[in-house]
Amino acid sequence: MSKVLSVLLIVFATSGVARSQKLSPNNDNPPSQGIAPKVTNGIGRADVRVFDESGNPIRNAYVKLESTRTDGFFCESWGDTDERGIVALLPIHMGSLKLKVKAKGYHSLILDVPADQLGEPVRVTLKRK
């Protein structure tokens, strides 16, 4: 009898956890896929979201993250934004970071990005030419 109660307790506890997880009701603002590195020159990932001045997403914006590490090595990761203006770049070793963003019909932008803030999306606004 105690095995049956144990199984029921586990099933009940598991279903409670599943119900408590929330899905984003608005898929236009998905959770960040960015990862801040935990140590100097550690691995991290940038989640970049590119918009125009009106807040509309920019599709096919080219995003490049350049990392100059304290040990002298250079790493880079790049990609194009999707229809929501989002790109999750491949993970790289993080040092001093420069983010370069360009899109057709917009002024290019170069930003310094603090590696310790990559847990949140990097929001970029481009101005029309």
Image (cartoon, helix red, strand yellow):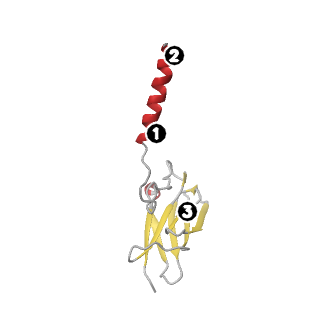
> Which element is circle 1 on?
helix
Type of amino acid under label 2: Lys
Residue at the spot 61% in from the left edge and 60% down from the top edge: 73
Disc 1: which residue? 18
* Residue 118 x, y percent position in the rendering: 46, 57
The extreme bottom residue here reads 129
First of labels 1, 2 by sequence position: 2
* Residue 29 x, y percent position in the rendering: 43, 61
Type of amino acid under label 3: Ser
Structural crowding at the residue carrying mark 2, measured as other residues with C-alpha within 10 Å and reported as few (<14), some (14–19) or many (≥20): few
The answer to which of 24 and 65 lies nearer the viewer is: 24
**Closer to us: mark 1 or mark 3?**
1
The extreme top residue here reads 1
Disc 2: which residue? 3
**For residue 76, what is the image quadrant?**
bottom right
Disc 3: which residue? 67
Type of amino acid under label 1: Ala
> Which element is circle 3 on?
strand
Residue at the spot 44% in from the left edge and 29% down from the top edge: 12
The answer to which of 61 and 5 lies nearer the viewer is: 5
First of labels 2, 3 by sequence position: 2
What distance separates the C-alpha of mark 2 from that of mark 3? 55 Å
What distance separates the C-alpha of mark 1 from that of mark 3? 38 Å
* Residue 72 x, y percent position in the rendering: 59, 60
**Closer to us: mark 2 or mark 3?**
2
